[in-house]
Image: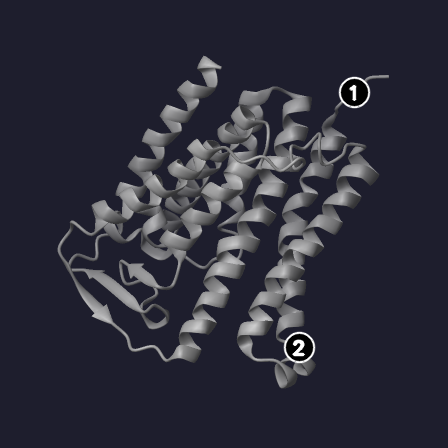
Amino acid sequence: MKKEWGIKDVLIALLGEGLLFGALILSVAIKDSESLVRRYPIEIRNILMGILYISFVIFGLLIICKGLLKINFRDCRILPIKIKTIWIILAFIMPLLVSGILLCFPGEWLNIEFSTANMITTLSLTLVFFGIAAPIVEEMIFRGMMLTVFEKKWNREIAIFLSSLLFGIGHIIGQKMELRDFFIMSLSAGLIGATLSLVTFITESIWSSVVIHMVWNIIIMGQIISIGGVRPLYSRYNYTFNSDSFLLTGGAFGIEASLPSIVINIIFLTIVWKLWKRR
């Protein structure tokens, strides 16, 4: 008998937001627990935090999907793991294009001397947590479970809109910033979310979206090279604009919310939308 998808299922899918933050809080709490702080260096604990974050979310999704929604990871496009080469190329083009455009604006470089220990600490957080764990977790929740539920309840267009909206909201929860920054941050994250949703539909898997998300986070949010001066104390190489216009800096959210970034995201969203409609 075919399942009738209702508002109850949508509300269950919204538990994904709570799972996202609950798993994060629990992972951070374990990483910073007194027993681990005394026994292991910060690099090991950063890696452990990333592994725990992924593990907690997978466990939570199993409960939500199989226990409550009566669907499996294959239905949510989480399994099998499939990655298309063309999307790996796109994954590098987008952030490198944004970075290249921003570096054309007047500014100056500030290089901070990092010890080997500081570099390892930075890489363990940038690569393992922001570069691997966060993209996997967010794609499983937003482009995996949520996108599937919304599609089954309504249609693919509404599913793209709602999952992208929730993805944007997820990036502003707990942030202290002005209303302008909230809007720009939501818009930027929502545009990226829509592109990733379309890629998921085209490939019938979340994993090409995971790769795009990973590369974007490492290049744009990574702490090896910082553009805009938002995180200068934690980056090895920093490029600070002469202008403090939020159109360049992206305000409190950083260059992800800058005007060049938003324009590039709109362009790529349009291209991917046309590819999806052609299919």
The residue shown at (56%, 31%) is 162
The one nearer the camera, 11 or 229, is 229
Most distant residue in the bottom direction: 38
The x, y position of residue 177, in whole percent, is 41, 57
Label 2 sits on what residue type?
A: Ser
How many numbered discs?
A: 2
The x, y position of residue 155, in whole percent, is 60, 19
Above/below status of 221 relative to 192: below
**Eye-nearest disc, 1 or 2:** 2
Most distant residue in the right direction: 1
Label 1 sits on what residue type?
A: Glu
Above/below status of 174 relative to 215: below
* 55 left or right, relative to 215: right
Above/below status of 192 relative to 215: above
* C-alpha distance separating marks 1 and 2: 45 Å
* 69 left or right, relative to 38: right
The one nearer the camera, 173 or 215, is 215
Q: Which residue is mark 1?
A: 4
* Residue 272 sits in quarter: top left
User: Which callout, 1 or 2, points at the residue further toward the start of the chain?
Assistant: 1
The residue shown at (52%, 44%) is 169
The one nearer the camera, 109 or 207, is 207
Q: Which residue is mark 2?
A: 33
For the N terminus, the quadrant is: top right
The residue shown at (55%, 26%) is 201
